[in-house]
Amino acid sequence: MTTAALAASVIFLLVFALITTERTHKATAALVGAALVLVLRLVDQHTAFHGEPGGAAGVDWNTIFLLVGTMIIVNVTKRTGVFQWAAIRAAKLVRGRPASLLVALCVVAAVLSAFLNNVTTIMLIAPVTILFCDVLETDAVPFLICTVIASNLGGGATLIGHPPNIMIGSAAGFSFTDFLRVDLPFIAVVLTLFLLATWLFLRRTVQVPEADRLRLLALDESTAITDRPLLHRCVIVMGLTLAGFVAHGWLGLEPATIALAGAALLLLLHREGPEEVLREVEWPTLLFFIGVFIMVSALVKNGVMQLLGHGLFLASHGSVPALTLGTLWLSGGVCGVVEPVSFTAAMIPLVQSVAHSLHPAASPAELAGLMRTTNLQALWWALSLGANLGANLTLIAAATNVVAAGIGERTGHRITFRRFLRYGLPLTLVNLVLASVYLWVRFLR
């Protein structure tokens, strides 16, 4: 390992330690780390901000502006009172029973995340979740963590649900139906087990007094809507935006472009000025992401990610089963602390080079066919499942986790790193074990 690679690794680990111990705000820690790798020239500014072809990924501005646009839409919409209406209505449908609503919210989050960006899903569901918990005077943190976990699981079920799947599908030539054929059955099983565990372990914890339940059932949700004309505009704009997310590939537009267009249109239709809406954007969350992207670009630039992959290849001695399971666990572990897009970008060339090493005489066309039709395809699915399952390991593993934490902190429901880890660590370990069995039975035996 070079001096630059060692320095980039030490800085990242120190920042991770600061976030884990919560000695400083995660946004501050990430920005300090980003500043250090730039000042020490472990990565140049152009690479950090824009990436380089076939190399370091840089800041993912599509993610940043997707978050900005979605936050603006949600901030305008919540002024109508529709989230309060939804919270009361949903609570009444389950007769004020928190455990039932928690399971229902998880199902909705998982299904929506399979077809929409999971950050958008959590931006819509988190405010409703918090308002429901406030009405029942119960702790919102378990609700937020469980809906985030369900959202991450649901996003891993399809080609378009999670960015690593899009990247893997493009590199491997997998179609939408390929992901439905391989990832969806496994995700359906682990999601069902998660919902069952959530019900069994939390149904006693999230109980509320009978008086609070009856008080909730007596509320009139129709009085929660405070601005019907604005609500009508918001419904139209949100409908157009969600349709744009679904059809963004056909339209040839990035999700960030669609989100910004929706935000701009809604601000134009909103009678009040944009100052208050923009003030409520989760700027610390956005700055945290920028800092993490820059630090990860330094890791990729200096070969740290490639070194991990090369070490995996040497340890496996070229065995496809060992490589597959190693890729799964490496992806799950690393993507629990490193932004998965950059890790996936670094791993795709490694997977391709491994396949070439195993079949050096194959032409590029023959190699591509082998990687889609033989047990070599297990390497791609291991990377996909590992990157998706690792998103639930820690609070900083995925955009959904950090966004939910930002919303919770703003509303007085702070999700600590350690509390998220108590949910995420055992769940991720169990899911990785199940994924190992699934890959072995389906592709490797």
Image (cartoon, rainbow, N blue to C red):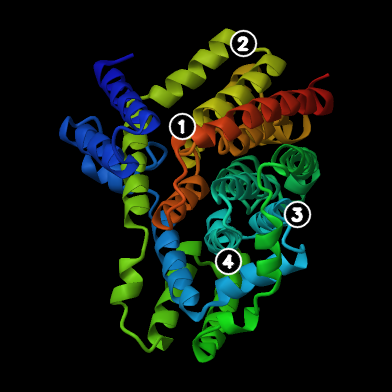
Q: How far apart are marks 2 and 4 (CA)?
A: 40 Å
Q: Residue visible at 69% across and 65% down?
A: 91
Secondary structure at numbered mark 1: loop
* Residue 254 appears in the picture as rendered: no
Image marks 1 and 2: residues in contact by CB distance under 8 Å: no
Q: How far apart are marks 3 and 1 (CA)?
A: 32 Å
Residue 156's place in the image compared with 358, above or below, is below
As drawn, which residue projects farthest toward the left? Answer: 39
Residue linked to disc 4 = 245
Per the rendering, the mark at residue 196 is none
Residue linked to disc 3 = 100
As drawn, which residue projects farthest toward the bottom? Answer: 229
In this view, the residue in front, 431 or 255, is: 431
Q: Residue visible at 52% across and 37% down?
A: 420
Q: How far apart are marks 1 and 2 (CA)?
A: 24 Å
Q: Quadrant of residue 75?
A: bottom left
In primary-sequence order, the first of circles 1 and 2 is 2
* Amino acid of disc 2: Ser
In primary-sequence order, the first of circles 1 and 4 is 4
In primary-sequence order, the first of circles 3 and 4 is 3
In primary-sequence order, the first of circles 2 and 4 is 4
Secondary structure at numbered mark 2: helix
Per the rendering, the mark at residue 316 is 2
Residue 251's place in the image compared with 440, above or below, is below
Q: Residue visible at 37% across and 46% down?
A: 289
* Residue 322 appears in the picture as rendered: yes
The image quadrant where one finds the N terminus is top left
Residue linked to disc 1 = 337
